[in-house]
Amino acid sequence: MKYTFFILRKAIAENPVEFIFAAVVFILAAAARIWYPLHIKTEQLYDFATYHKLAQNIYDGLGHSLNGASNAWTGPGYPYALAFFFKLCGNTTVASAKLFNILLSSAVLILSYLIVAKTVVSKRLRFVSYLLLSFMPVFISYVNVVGTETFFVFLLTFLLFVRVYFKQGYAVSAIIGVLTGALALTKPFMLVYPVICGCMLWTETKDIKKTLVQTAVVALCAIALISPWTLRNYRAFGRFIPISYNMGYNMYVNNNSSNTNGAWMDIARIEKSAEAEETINRYLKNGERSIKEAYDIEPFLKSEAVKWIKAHPVQYAKLGLLRVRQTYFCGANDVEQWARNAMTYENAGNGLTRAQFQQNQNLIRLVYDLTFTLFNCFGILFLFATFWSYAKTFFTKANMITQLTGTVFINIAFFTVIFFAFEGQARYAFPVMFFMIMSAISFCDSRGRKSIRVALKP
């Protein structure tokens, strides 16, 4: 924190006009994040209600549990962080959870400013970057949701900040490892992120020994942070569960012959054999047991999913492409579903006619869809445009890309592969939006202005 204040002080001294601009943007963007939950009504449903309940139980001394039993349906990162904030607030209200999001999102504004100030030399492009990262509609809207999204982006942005401002030695690699472990405890697919950290370091340094050693440090520190939770799961459930036991379920409901769009579907609607139906009913006790409580069903569902994927590789590939489409190119429907789902004419009409109210809602949806889809298009075009340059840089000693381009490319590629392989929906694109926006900036550099310079320190 002291070092961050030093960086801010240096930025003020070197670029006072730009800092004043960034400060004004920060104040307005933070105000928007405060205004939104005060005026936009929402209800916490499904997984979001589960996160809230888990945090309440932790706050009450019941541990990471649901309905009186230990639970590991989700990773513990966000519920424990939220429970800690509840302790500071002295209550477990949804309003306190939203306040937590506001503070985290505001911290992301500062971290984003510092990252952009360090990596983008063109003043005009820096201004554009600040504005886009500060006022992207989905970034503002998700402060209204009791979910992992804002917390996850805070951790990821903090990790990028550390990479940008500190020379990566053992201590910095250890910090990155701890942050990676925290990210994995929030979203378990981040267990493989040390590999991505290694890819970024390799393209920046071309030092194979340093890359292997520092990547090992990142991985070991991440494992050290995760291992107490893994041990807790073994004691609670009697088998090896690194973080959560929902992977088998997610693989099964997203990969089957009944699925038409690659997205989540109700397990009851999946066409299955009589034997599989009987087995699932036995684990769920004919509906008396929630899938979130059925820790022992995962091996069966995972084996069924793997069996189906092996037997239907072409169909699996089709579903994977549909998952990517569902995530990036079907608009920001998640905002209506989760961040403003209680905005009805009856409680938010404000004197308008029903038709006028619906017109306004449709226009708001248009803004979300346009901004969301536009930058996702930039990101995917950037992915294809940069692929060969990145591949040549990665597999040779040549350095054909900037460090910023390499960081943006590998992260977009990583998240896209995750969506392709497992599950896709619009809200999963939320943590990728930072990279999508920066891909537009990097794209301007590689295809137009050639004005971005990078000062990432390996």
Image: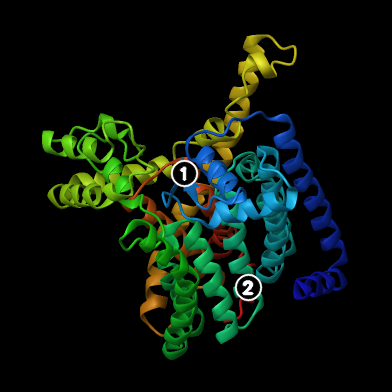
Residue 434 as seen in the image, left or right of residue 214: right
Colouring scheme applied when the structure was drawn: rainbow
Amino acid found under the numbered disc labelled 1 = Gly
- Other-residue count near label 2 (Cα within 10 Å), few / some / many at <14 / 14–19 / ≥20: many
Instruction: Using the image as rendered, state which of residue 222 and residue 316 is in the foreground.
Output: 222
The answer, for residue 437, to whether it is visible in the render is no
Measure the C-alpha gap from mark 2 to mark 1: 40 Å
Tell me which residue sits at (64%, 79%) in the image: 166
As helix, strand or loop, the secondary structure at mark 2 comes to: helix
Pick the quarter of the image with the C terminus.
bottom right
Relative to 133, residue 118 above or below? below
Residue 121 as seen in the image, left or right of residue 445: right
* Residue marked by disc 1: 68
Amino acid found under the numbered disc labelled 2 = Val
* Residue marked by disc 2: 162
Relative to 330, residue 445 above or below? below
Q: Going by the picture, which residue comes out furthest to the bottom? A: 209
